[in-house]
Each structure stands twice: as structure tokens, then as C-alpha cells.
Image (cartoon, rainbow, N blue to C red):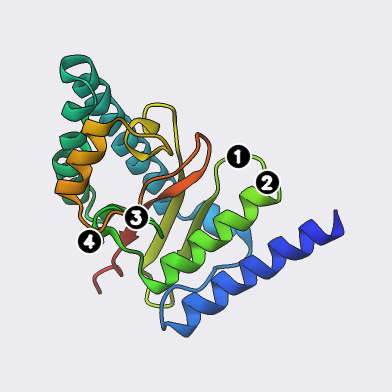
Amino acid sequence: MIAVRSSLLVSLVLVAFAAGAEGQAAETSPVERKDADPRLAESRALVAGFAESLLEALQQGLQNGGPLAAIPACRDLAPQLASDASRRAGAAVGRTSRRYRNPLNAPEPWQSVVLKTFEVQMATGVAGVPEYFAVSEDGSARYMKAILLGPLCATCHGASLAAEVAAQLDADYPHDLARGYAVGDLRGAFTVYWPAPAE
């Protein structure tokens, strides 16, 4: 138990250190101050809406045309959903992963550190879906919430893909890193960036 707590403490310190070292967001303290920031609740709501819309699109694609029809939902619709949510909220909404399919979703250094922290949290049995929220000195804020691979997503991200699905992914993503997952694995994270308030 002590080892688990120590690992989590080290990982959280690493997140704060890496974010600060990048000249970026550093963890605010105490936790109550973070919870009082309305952008935390807004970030959670944005991510929930994004995830729900994406899941609905995937389900519809699978129902209408099988796995091959679901691929465009992530390829084409997900960026549009993120763009729409960003425009409405005045924040930058997106997804990232250390094993990305689209190079445009490659993590920034601070995001990579947070993803590693999520991995530690999951490996040590922390309850719930990992999330991260930090506010920088200039007032900007960052949020990440882990994406855990669901059964539906295993169709295109699992260890065993149908031949036609693999062929389509090879054509669409020649440098694809996002295969070989098991249900429940950390797939990546939803991200929200809030710019500093205008003075």
C-alpha cells in the first residue's frame, strides 16, 4: 500500500515538474482550488459530449455498413466534432495518444507525461477513469481524461482485426501505431485547453 501511494506521489510530482519545466501549466494546490475552477466542470462536460457523439457515430456506422463504415467516423467525423466543440466552448478540444493512429494527434511533451501518469494509476489499481487538470500562472488551463478501450473500439484497435479492416487502416494510416489493444486498456486521452483570460 505504501509502495502504491509512493508511486502515485512520484508520478504526480513528475507531471507537475514536467509541466512547469516546459514553461506550461503547473498543478494548482490544494485540490479544492482546482475543483472551484468552473473550467474543470466545463471540461468534463465537453469531453462527455464529445465521447457520446463519437460513440453514436461509430454505432451508426457499424449498423449501416459494418466496420469499414465505422472507420470514417473516427477519421473524418471525430476532428469535426472536436472542432465544433472547440468553437462553441472557446477552448481547444481534441484527443491524443502515445500510440496514435493519426500523427496530428501525437501528444505534446506535457501530455505524454500525463499519459504515463495515467498508466501508473491504472497499473496500481486506482479506482475510476484517470483525469488531470492544471492551471498555469497566466490563467490558462489544461484538462485530460483517459480513454479506455471499449468493446466497440476493439473492432479497429484490437489485437485481432478483420482482414478488410486492417487493409483499410493500412491505406488510411500508413504509420498506424494504434493496434493491439485489449478491452480496458488505456487508449489515450481526451484533451481540453483553455486559453488565458483576456485582460
Disc 4 residue type? Leu
Label 2 and label 4: CA atoms lie apart by 30 Å
- Residue 126, numbered circle: 2
Could you tell me the amino acid type at mark 2? Answer: Val
Q: Which residue is mark 1?
A: 128
Question: Furthest-top residue in view?
Answer: 63
Nearer-N-terminus badge (2/3): 2
- The amino acid type found where label 1 is placed reads Gly
Label 4, label 1: how many angstroms apart (C-alpha)?
28 Å
Is residue 83 at all visible to an observer of this figure?
Answer: no
Give the mark nearer the N terminus: 2 vs 4: 4
Q: Secondary structure at mark 2?
A: loop
Q: Is residue 108 left or right of residue 53?
A: right
Q: Estimate the spatial distance between the alpha carbons at disc 1 and disc 3, rounded to whole Å.
A: 26 Å
Instruction: Kindly state the secondary structure of the residue where label 3 is placed.
Output: loop
Instruction: Kindly identify the residue that appears in the image at 35 percent across and 70 percent down.
Output: 108
User: Observer-nearest residue: 192 or 187?
Assistant: 187
Q: Are marks 1 and 3 in contact (CB under 8 Å)?
A: no
First in sequence: mark 1 vs mark 3: 1
Q: Quadrant of residue 64?
A: top left
For residue 113, the mark is none
